[in-house]
Amino acid sequence: MAIKRDIADLKLAHDGKARIEWAERSMPVLRLIRERFKKEKPLKGINIAACLHVTTETANLMRTLKAGGATCTLCASNPLSTQDEVAAALVKEYGVSVFAVRGENNKLYYKHINQSLDVKPHITMDDGADLLSTLHQDRRELLPGVLAGTEETTTGVIRLKAMAEEKALEYPVIAVNDSKTKHFFDNRYGTGQSTIDGVLRATNMLIAGSTVVIAGYGWCGRGVAMRAKGLGGNVIVTEVDSVKAIEAVMDGFQVMPMAKAAPLGDLFITLTGDIHVIRLEHAKKMKDGAVICNSGHFNVEIDIPALKKAASRVRTLRANVEEYTIGKKKICLLAEGRLINLSAAEGHPAMVMDMSFANQALAAEYVVKHHDRLEHKVYVVPEKIDDDIARLKLKSMGVSIDRLTPEQKKYLASWQMGT
């Protein structure tokens, strides 16, 4: 199949290739999978349409899928997360069709999704479920050819479970996000570090001594709260889930409604997957100079249209920082309310994405072998895949662990043996 593209500049390929190779150094598990795929070709004849962040780590996933025999097309899952040099290298150096330009508008974003779907996919890979949603709504003629899909994010899994509940999901999907070797590490440590990285690159603010309000205490929120506290921030958590709220309290954080946190915070970070977590009513209560940003998948967690409507002036102070004048206060919005870690920084470190994308690659292999046994539901990654990835990661880190003795196995399998 001919390589197609809509990217910023093919001349950036040299720099992109160097960055992809740098990321590969920290992705030993994916590299081992790629070596096996190259020999076994488990994805031979399979077309894969992927809607993911176009980063160096994703590039190494594309290389792995292609080594397994797949034909891949890639489009961006967020308008501001594309690394243009990586897109160029994927096209020129690795023969992957890419449709992604950093800063693309909404119209071009969905055009690129449709161009990616033109491959007539057997497998879809999503980061937020926009590709799958477009396929189900606008490209239904392609549905009979789809074996299964995978989903990378919490937000996407929520959408897919809603589709499955309504019997609207037309093929099985593996919730890669829900595997232990993904959300325990990618969501917590990856989002934790990269979100703070994005805030610091955008603002150069000092976290120590600042009051940081974290909206949402899922695995991503936990990670950001942990990192903000480690940098000396005074962390407040807002939640709607009682159990998560108790956990935040016992982890040492203040917990309160957003309305009470609004006057106290210096920095606000949303990570809920829901809409309008920060609204105009909250912004009006904030300190002059408060900074707000989002690290959830879509740019809907902050009610940006309401802020724009209420603002007497909006101006750009520096890259990824817009100042909204609302009444006598100035509120700063980072990265247009899009993913701060990918819009203002480079996203998750390659070392943690190694496990996430190992899940993607092995999930693709799994659905090729087992799709005929799967219903139109959302499935978790099989436990054996999770365990294999963890084992390989530990090995790559030079870490060994104990094994159960025969006596211990017998004890754990017995209900008769007690004290």
Image (cartoon, rainbow, N blue to C red):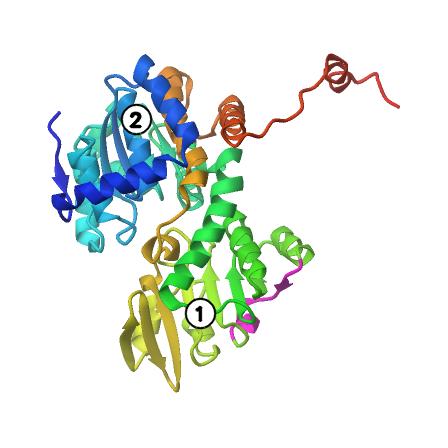
Tag on residue 205?
Answer: 1
Q: CA distance from mark 2 to mark 1?
A: 40 Å
Q: Judge whether residue 258 is colored magenta.
A: yes
Is 400 situated left or right of 385 in this image?
Answer: right
Q: Residue at x 42, y 41 (%)?
A: 162
Image position, residue 208 (x, y; %)? 54, 68
Quadrant occupied by the N terminus: top left
| Tag 2 residue | 65
Q: Is residue 390 left or right of residue 90?
A: right
The reply to whether discs 2 and 1 touch (Cβ–Cβ < 8 Å) is no
Query: Residue 248: which disc?
Result: none
Answer above or below: position of 82 versus 97.
below
Q: Nearer the viewer, residue 111 or 346?
A: 346
- Does residue 384 show up? yes
Q: Is residue 403 above or below residue 241?
A: above
Query: Of 361 and 344, which appears nearest the observer?
Result: 344
Find the magenta span and give its range. Answer: 252-262
> Does residue 274 appear in this view?
no
Image position of 38 with respect to 230: above or below: above
Q: Quadrant of residue 92?
A: top left
Amino acid under disc 2: Leu
Residue found at x 40% / y 23%: 32
User: What amino acid is labelled 1 in the image?
Assistant: Met
From the viewer's perspective, is 308 left or right of 403? left
Q: Position of residue 313 (x, y in %)?
A: 28, 80
Quarter of the image where one finds residue 10 = top left
Occupied quadrant, residue 257: bottom right
What is the secondary structure assignment of the residue under circle 2?
Answer: helix
